[in-house]
Image: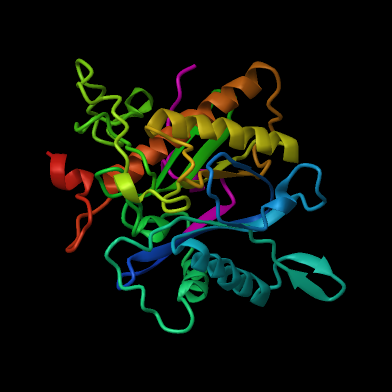
Amino acid sequence: MAFRAGSRNLLTDVAGLRVGNAVDARIRSGVSVVLCDRPAIAAVQVLGGAPGTRETDLLEPHNAVEKVDAIVLSGGSAFGLDSASGVQAYLRERGVGVKVHDLSIPIVPAAILFDLVNGGDKDWGRYPPYRDLGYEAAEVASETFEMGSAGAGFGALTAGLKGGLGSASTVLSNGITVSALVAVNAVGSATVGDTPHFWAAPFEIGYEFGARGMPASAPADATDVALKFRSGNAPGANTTIAVIATDAVLSKAGAKRLAMSAHDGFARAIWPAHTPADGDLVFALATGGSGVVPEGDAAIELGAAAAATMARAIARGVFAAEPAAGDFFPAWRARWAR
């Protein structure tokens, strides 16, 4: 079961999805939006202890709404939930959404990460800027987009390194594509101890995050619990949020199972993951564009690919982060790029 990356190695290798990013450099925060050209089956799985969300209850398999028009990942903690209103406004102007009488109501679930303590100026006045950032991100959504210090990953941090926005894709032998988008702001570390080696190294395809592999021998601090702020890891002050997408034909319950599998990628790429101080969450989108219904071994392969793709996306987000003046923590490439 050899995996290969899609042509872009981005979330948008699943046809019918576009991604837009917007940032406010002064506050060191941003928003990432996934737009669905057609409503897509959606689900969510939360495993972190401190999530911040909008419209996630409707994604449970037993609830009525099956499809969504967009997904939003945002910085800003609870303030960032406003970003979904901006995306909803953008879609409503274009007549997108569930039709109720003569109204269109866009379905836009969202999740946020905490980037309020990263050196940015959060004195934004009466209202936070996230609604406008959401609209701006939707306006620029396309099939190509920046990673690293971009969108929801702009102000992200991990244990000792800058976090970032990452993406990756995998094409399976049966023609199904699975792809991931993730904003990495974990309390834990994406690298093995104080080394440039990513925990996700066994899943790397080509040179997508430096091709350093695993260390020849485990460093003494490989399994030290290197937390972001040590004494300051309050509940909700971190969080990795993500989207896993596929063109497979899935039910809402199947999409939830896909989101659960993608969380295995968190555990393979971040040490530790799913802590009480993280709000770790994965949205799942299934467009059905391939026409393939994964059953039996194919369903197992899809779950494995979801985990591997998510792990790669996490490493790519940290790998691509750019150094900037006033950084709390160094970027990976500032320490180890060669």
Residue furthest left in the image: 338
Would residue 124 be counted in the magenta stretch? no
Residue 22 horizontal/vertical position (percent): 41, 67
Would residue 14 be counted in the magenta stretch? yes
Q: What residue is drawn where x is 29% and y is 31%?
A: 198
Q: What residue is drawn where x is 27% and y is 29%?
A: 192
Residue 122 horizontal/vertical position (percent): 36, 73
Residue 284: image quadrant is top right
Q: Chief secondary structure of the magenta span? A: loop
Residue 222 horizontal/vertical position (percent): 26, 25
Q: Is residue 337 visible?
A: no
Q: What residue is drawn where x is 45% and y is 48%?
A: 239
310 relative to 288 in the view: left or right: left
Give the color scheme: rainbow, by chain, secondary structure or one colour. Answer: rainbow
Q: What residue is drawn where x is 30% and y is 68%?
A: 120
The C terminus: image quadrant: top left
Residue furthest bottom in the image: 126
Decide which of 296, 275 is in the foreground and name it.
275
Q: Reply above or below: 253 against 182.
A: above
Residue 201 horizontal/vertical position (percent): 32, 27
271 relative to 106 in the view: left or right: left
Q: Reply above or below: 198 against 1.
A: below
Residue furthest right in the image: 101
Q: Is residue 36 visible?
A: yes
31 relative to 246 in the view: left or right: left
Q: Which residues are magenta?
A: 1-19
Q: Reply above or below: 269 against 236.
A: above
Q: Total label count?
A: 0
